[in-house]
Image: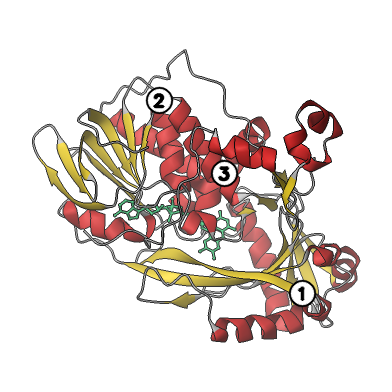
């Protein structure tokens, strides 16, 4: 795996999160050669694996921003791609709940904002309807706004599907290659990595939490990433009937706020917090975050707190000092920055890739799609609402390994593990190497 290469790639994409994987997939569908350079030993292993995994409609984005446009577009692109590849999605819908008079009064403006974002399906509902849709909600809800399109998705399968597609289309995935520097010359850029140099004509920086450091290697000092930690609780699957829909708070200037959401794996999730840090590797949970979430949960849905918490985790948003996505092309240096994809990148990733292809085309690259592309991969289903291998009698009849359960909590079978090792991106050994060192 990951042998050093002397090839000069047409394009090197730094970062194999959802954004880098989506970009690599699109570019690998052309006649250009593509390398994906990733510090970790797996794809989607940083922010893309630790989020709330909602497929957002974009109803609450700031109208007129690039983020608003790309989230709305990404919602449809990823929804369609999920249907073709088997990425599990459940169209649960969401209810945004007002708990104070001030929040209640803010709801019509949020509906209006959704419409300015091109989303026309929201409805204002009274308290009785809120409790009809969410009977286990705590007391005190005054009204709500429905967002029927908000959905839950598997974030892990999304990154893996896009990266698998990229590799099957011919992209070279270089894992455990932390980028430490770059030298731009007339026709070629040399990217220095922990495992040797990679050369490419164009470089795309999709390094998430490390994007500002890489940007400096290209002579820029235009933004700083501040890791904004979001901690979450995961409740036992027995809690799932309590949350038939996503329960959203009224958003504030700090972000989308603490929500309750069913997960695609049949659990219920409470979070995330929002806390600015300095350490870009501090993706652990904290006692303060635990207490804060307990307090929030008690108000939102006391019955949820009677259920067992089976896991907690945290993700780091790549927040930057700029209100919109920061996507800029530098044709002279043959360099493209994809920065500040903080709270919505799971949804928008495929639309970001489409936008980048447009920028590269305007810069003169021929991105005509090859006629001989392989079909998109069929991903193994780990969603609870769809048939899992251990439940599929016909499959087990053909291959008894799918009937041999090795993880009794999540019902993972020996057949699925065997398939993962034989896949285009087999699992690597676990190493904790942070978000990639500073160049
Ligand atoms: C708590 C939380 C909740 C969220 N909820 C949602 C949600 O519900 N819906 C939604 O759409 N979005 C959500 N998001 C946002 C979404 O998760 C991110 O926008 C998205 O994952 C960003 O993807 P990325 O590829 O840009 O970054 P990442 O996934 O971080 O990928 C960047 C990659 O670059 C690599 N890298 C960094 N530096 C280097 C280097 N020097 N050399 C080589 N590789 C390097 C990293 O290892 C990493 O794999 C949430 C985020 C958080 C934290």
Residue shown at 32% from the left, 58% from the top: 436
Residue shown at 77% from the left, 74% from the top: 308
Q: Nearer the viewer, mark 3 or mark 2?
A: 2
The CB of the residue at mark 3 lies under 8 Å from ligand 1: no
Assess whether mark 2 and mark 1 are in contact (beta carbons under 8 angstroms): no
Ligand 1's quadrant is: bottom left
Alpha carbon separation for disc pair 1 and 3? 28 Å
- Residue located beneath label 3 in the image: 158
Circle 3 Cα neighbour tier, 10 Å, few/some/many (<14 / 14–19 / ≥20): many
Residue shown at 35% from the left, 76% from the top: 278
The CB of the residue at mark 1 lies under 8 Å from ligand 1: no
Height in image: 98 above or below 213? below
- Residue located beneath label 2 in the image: 170
Alpha carbon separation for disc pair 1 and 2? 45 Å
Disc sitting over residue 242 in the figure = none
Q: Secondary structure at mark 3?
A: helix
Residue 94 pos. (x, y %): 74, 59
Viewer-closest of 219 and 46:
46
Mark earlier in primary sequence (3, 2): 3
- Give the quadrant of the C terminus: bottom left
Residue 418 pos. (x, y %): 61, 37
The answer, for residue 271, to whether it is visible in the render is no
- Residue located beneath label 1 in the image: 308
Height in image: 246 above or below 418? below
The CB of the residue at mark 2 lies under 8 Å from ligand 1: no
Residue that sits furthest to the top in the current view = 371
Position of residue 431 in the picture relative to residue 52 (left or right): left
Quarter of the figure with residue 51: bottom right
Q: Secondary structure at mark 2?
A: loop
Viewer-closest of 214 and 132:
214
């Amino acid at each position: 795996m990951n042998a050093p290469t002397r090839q000069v790639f047409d394009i090197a994409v730094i970062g194999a999160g959802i954004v880098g994987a989506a970009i690599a997939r699109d570019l690998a569908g052309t006649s250009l050669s593509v390398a994906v350079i990733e510090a970790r030993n797996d794809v989607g292993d940083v922010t893309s694996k630790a989020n709330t995994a909602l497929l957002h409609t974009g109803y609450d984005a700031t109208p007129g921003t690039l983020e608003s446009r790309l989230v709305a577009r990404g919602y449809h692109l990823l929804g369609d791609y999920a249907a073709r590849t088997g990425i599990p999605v459940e169209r649960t819908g969401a209810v945004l709940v007002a708990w104070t008079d001030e929040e209640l009064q803010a709801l019509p403006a949020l509906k209006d904002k959704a419409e300015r974002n091109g989303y026309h399906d929201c409805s204002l509902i009274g308290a009785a309807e809120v409790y009809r849709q969410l009977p286990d909600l705590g007391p005190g809800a005054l009204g709500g706004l429905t967002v029927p399109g908000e959905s839950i998705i598997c974030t892990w399968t999304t990154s893996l599907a896009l990266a698998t597609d990229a590799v099957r289309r011919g992209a070279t995935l270089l894992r455990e290659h932390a980028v430490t520097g770059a030298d731009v010359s007339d026709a070629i850029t040399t990217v220095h990595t922990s495992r040797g140099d990679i050369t490419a004509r164009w470089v795309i920086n999709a390094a998430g939490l490390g994007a500002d450091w890489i940007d400096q290697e290209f002579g820029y000092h235009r933004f700083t990433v501040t890791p904004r930690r979001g901690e979450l609780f995961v409740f036992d699957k027995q809690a799932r009937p309590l949350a038939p829909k996503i329960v959203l708070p009224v958003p504030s200037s700090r972000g989308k706020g603490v929500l309750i959401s069913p997960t695609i794996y049949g659990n219920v999730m409470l979070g995330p917090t929002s806390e600015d840090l300095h350490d870009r590797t501090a993706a652990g949970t904290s006692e303060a975050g635990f207490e804060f979430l307990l307090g929030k949960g008690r108000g939102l849905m006391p019955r949820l707190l009677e259920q067992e918490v089976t896991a907690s985790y945290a993700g780091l948003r790549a927040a930057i000092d700029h209100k919109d996505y920061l996507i800029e092309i530098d044709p002279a240096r043959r360099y493209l920055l994809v920065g500040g994809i903080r709270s919505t990148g799971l949804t928008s990733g495929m639309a970001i890739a489409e936008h980048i292809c447009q920028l590269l085309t305007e810069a003169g690259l021929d991105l005509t799609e090859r006629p001989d592309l392989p079909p998109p991969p069929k991903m193994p289903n780990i969603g609870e609402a769809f048939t899992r291998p251990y439940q599929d009698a016909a499959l087990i009849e053909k291959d008894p390994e799918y009937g041999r359960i090795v993880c009794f909590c999540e019902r993972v079978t020996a057949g699925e593990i065997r398939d993962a090792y034989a896949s285009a991106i087999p699992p690597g050994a676990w190493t904790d190497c942070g978000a990639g060192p500073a160049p």
